[in-house]
Image: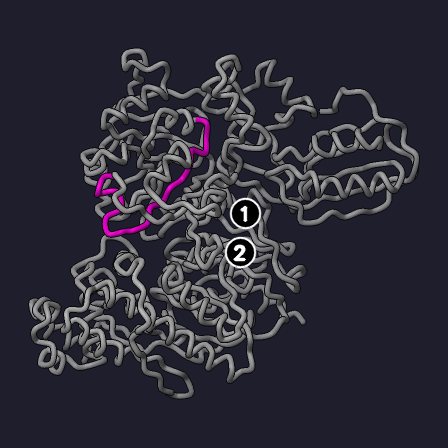
Amino acid sequence: MSSTSEPARPADGPGVQVRVRGLVQGVGFRPTVWRIARELGVVGSVCNDGDGVLIRVWGEPERIDELCRRLKDDCPPLAGIDAIEQSPLPVSPERSDFVIVPSAVTAVHTGVVPDAATCGACAAEIADPANRRYRYAFTNCTHCGPRLSIVRGIPYDRASTSMSAFPMCADCAREYADPADRRFHAQPNACPVCGPRVWLADADGNELDPAALGGVDTIDSASRLLADGRIVAVKGIGGFHLACDATNDKAVKLLRRRKRRWLKPFALMARDLDVIRRYCRLSDQEARLLHSAAAPVVLLDLEDGADLAPGVAPGHTALGFMLPYSPLHRLLLQNWDRPLVMTSGNSSDEPQCIDNDDALARLRSIADALVLHDRDIVNRVDDSVLRILDHAPRPLRRARGFAPAPLTLPQGFRSTPPILALGSELKNTVCLLQDGHAVLSQHLGDLSDVKTCLAYEATVALYRRVFEHRPDAVAVDLHPGYRASSFGRDLAIAEGLQLVEVQHHRAHIAAVLADNGWPLDAGPVVGIALDGSGYGDDGSIWGGEWLVGDYRSLLRVGHLRPVALPGGTQAILEPWRNLFAQIVASIGWDDFARDYSALAVTAALEQRPLGILAKMIAGEVNSPLTSSVGRLFDAVAAALGICADRIAYEGQAAMELEAVCKGIETEQGYCFGLFEDDGCWVLDPAPMWRQLFADLAEAVPSAQISARFHLGLANAVCDLGVRIAEAHAIRTVGLSGGVFQNRTLFDLVCNRLHARGLDVLSHRRVPTNDGGLALGQAVTAAALLAAVGT
């Protein structure tokens, strides 16, 4: 569609084609170009295509230069410019005005903008009784609203979204066609006359009358149900939430029982920062994160005496808070001076519901009522989670608000072949690498559930279709049993693609290098990868690794001393098994039982089938060796009586162990041993265990023991890292792996490495956990293939 506004002044000068690459579609970029061009008096046109935005402009060279400069300075809030490229055009202009022309369908080399929180202008409209969008739950503009969650293809036009089902009324069409309006080509643009509608249903799907519930409309009625202690399923932007009053103990307990999520913390949503400050300490940096366009869940330190239901986050000293990021959520919470639980709409371990019928089928036994609407969610998008670690925001889950914004790859990767990387078993994401960028998907979840696996495969297909991605190779984890790896191997065979298997911890280190823009040929680093488990070169389970090298080659030069994992997966679920294995390896059970017979942990362990476990370990029966630091955390937690019997969710024991030492200062850390074995450094926790049990015998508080463990481990991690760095004349250390989500350990390690004069690379754009693994797989595969081709 062309604009009908008055023409600009005639052109006086040569023409230039300006190519703008990056996140520049669906964000109001073309009207920004149109406005600046008219102000500068140049003529030409602007359109979307598969590469981004294409501008053809004629005028004085100084004016064209000014146009390009102002595109950067006046860039719309949701846009992200990667490059502005210029090339000459014929001297004769194609027109005597400046217009916006229809999108061109070309090969896709641009990105999809993440979903964005409601902007201030739209928030004001839904709060204004005189505005035609008063209390309208789907109000948006080019500065905010759904993007990834509704998109089916590129170029990003209404026909390529789930909004194609809603023809615009005359008023919305005028806004959509006016380049001076902030809703110009806002693809989800709608109003109560022509757009999606929202309604309230009971658990059987019957529509409820708001008036009968005393509400002014559907959302007000849902708010009243929540205030009455009910559980309400809410269809949001990227999926359903289950909501209840976070201060109502009975409602929270009921939600846990119905959802079968017994202990894992619930995320919370609050109306504004003032409400959050009543429950958590909030820094300026954290407040900016909460108020950003991404509007993530931010982990915040709990205030002492916060009046919340005990079941919201049992065993934790941090809460995950977010602000309302859609008009629907804003309206739902506008009268609430306390927070709502806002947890994913699913039963435990299942994927989040996105479809009305699916929600009615799966959530009817959980929710008392459901807030439904008729705008289809095309792509499931969970809430992102961030935490401030070492003074910087770090993503723990990258999803709504961040994905699938492309990540510019470091120098040296511009000409690498297209790669499809399929991620890990847990916290899965997939990555598409091409044209010097990596598109990392939103968090897809754990692939242990059949429904999640099906959703995973559908997401891979959708990303490949939307981004027209035709890979030369598929990168997978080395593990022979990972579902994502099996899927990738089958895909490589079916399509004749090269298969690249990347060891888990090498992918972690490659991910942190790419996250920090480390050039392909910049030289080696010391990589420290600490996590729960990853399949190692020798078939054992790695998880405490010191590596030296770069994208192409990372040599294992150190690791935590391997200890048996009696029962395999069962030992991951039952931390007491790890404790017993550590005792056997470090002290010996007979000596331990003799020297520490009076300890409560000794009596507790003696109630277990230790004879059977001892035979399993000695006979190497279902007792694989592991160097996992995550399992070491589990064992220490079990020694203190934390989650000793069983964990209810991944990382529970380690999280609660960290929470115990919150705010505790100690200058005394436990000691670790160090020895060489077959040319590899081995960090030995045996001395630490003797000191820990001695403290238990002296009745040292658990908080002090936890603090001493964290400090001792941090010292040991740093000392070995420094030793390796000095031996290889390296000044840079990269940190990755899920254990580095632990703020206490991460901050200690960073501070100590900096104090020893080393540069530290850590994650800032992608998660340090397995959510960033696909990026590491992709860049490793690209580097290896590039090396073969040279």
Instruction: Identify the residue shown where x is 48% and y is 72%.
Output: 755
Q: Nearer the viewer, residue 653 or 779?
A: 653
Amino acid carrying mark 1 in the image = Arg
Residue 323 percent location from the top left of the image: 42, 36
Residue 1 percent location from the top left of the image: 71, 24
- Place residue 594 in its image quadrant: bottom left
Residue 597 percent location from the top left of the image: 8, 76
* 375 in magenta: no
Amino acid carrying mark 2 in the image = Leu
- Place residue 218 in its image quadrant: top left
Q: Secondary structure at mark 2?
A: strand
Can residue 561 be seen here? yes
Query: Dot 1 corresponds to which residue?
Result: 464
Q: Marks 1 and 2, Cα distance to the nearest angstrom? A: 9 Å
Q: Give the magenta part as a residue range.
A: 308-327
Label disc, if present, on residue 420 of the rendered structure: 2
The reply to whether the C-beta atoms of the residues labelled 1 and 2 are less than 8 Å apart is yes
Q: Nearer the viewer, residue 330 or 420?
A: 330
